[in-house]
Image (cartoon, helix red, strand yellow):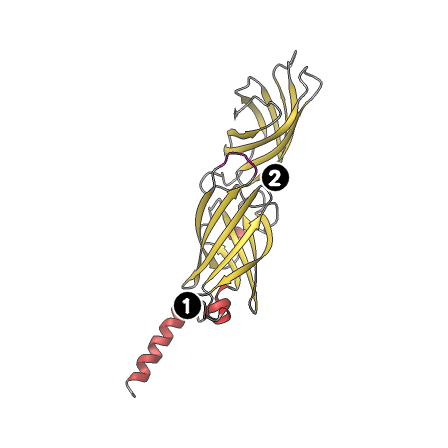
Amino acid sequence: MRLLYPILTAVLLLLLTTTGGLAGMAQFAGSWTNVDTNTAGITKLDIAVMGTNVNVQGWGKCHPTDCDWGTVQAQAFAPGVSSDITSGADTLIAVFDAGFSETTLIIKTVGNRLNVDSYDRFKDNSGRSNYLASYTFQKGQAPGGTTPGGVTPGGTIPGSVPAMIDLTGVWNCDDGGIYYVRQLGTTVWWYGELDPNAPNWSNVMRGTISGNMINADWSDVPKGSVMQNGNLVLQIASNNRLVAVSKTGGFSGSVWTR
């Protein structure tokens, strides 16, 4: 028995070292940042634990500041039906609903880190595919000291969003038109026309950047003879290429380049 005590003590210390000394609900609490500082997806999670209640606040990569997804109540899950949630929870599920999309996070601890699987489902009939992304988080400050705050989740496809989105400039489109684009933060405007001297059509647009997508409303203006309007969902393929994934109102253009 005397020999057994040191062995048990060593095993206990090893478990405390590999799990951070916490188990159940308490292991999730804290401010967590993505280990990949260049991620185009989720950058930070704040998890608050109060008894059996858990609130999760998330941020996604945006420019000039990260997008604040707001706070939702998460559900905790234990390994078995007879397990105690407070001491035995090993999984959290948090759902962020942005209206046009829904992001479900499956959150687990591995040692002193979080493994997060993010399932994005689009509800706006844009034709975008639902997708899965996986992340690893550690406790710490926001990457680069950025103060999170901004817009919404759902549309940040890992690896496809430039670290700095800058769309201001003159663009050409496959509809033959020229588009004069101005970006201020997450808001984008344009004026587009077929011919500066005698345009058959001319239009204006105002949109909001969310991840690598722009959700926008557009309308023809009386400089041209066409009078239509509708909605556009554009994918930011790069700082020099935009692609329409959803169009209403008879809009003809699909690809913009500069």
Residue 142 in view of the camera: no
Which residue corresponds to mark 2?
186
Where is the N terminus found, in terms of image quarters?
Answer: bottom left
Asked whether residue 14 is drawn in magenta, I would say no
The secondary structure that dominates the magenta segment is loop
> What residue is shown at x 34% (from left), y 75% (from top)?
11
Left or right position of 221 against 105: right
Amino acid at the residue labelled 1:
Thr
Query: Which is nearer the eye, 144 or 20?
Result: 20
- Give residue 138's position: percent from left, percent from top: 46, 58
> What residue is shown at x 58% (from left), y 18% (from top)?
177
Amino acid at the residue labelled 2:
Thr
Determine which of the numbered discs, if any, sits on residue 249 in the image: none
**Residues in magenta, as a range:** 124-128
Residue 84 in view of the camera: yes
- Give residue 135's position: percent from left, percent from top: 44, 51
> What residue is shown at x 68% (from left), y 19% (from top)?
227
Q: Nearer the viewer, mark 2 or mark 1?
A: 1
Location of residue 223 (image quadrant):
top right
Left or right position of 68 against 4: right
Asked whether residue 125 is drawn in magenta, I would say yes
Q: On screen, 69 above or below 11?
A: above
Query: Which is nearer the eye, 200 or 105?
Result: 105
Left or right position of 61 against 133: right
Element type at mark 2: loop
Of all residues, the one furthest to the bottom in this rendering is 2
Which residue corresponds to mark 1?
19
Q: On screen, 70 above or below 250?
A: below
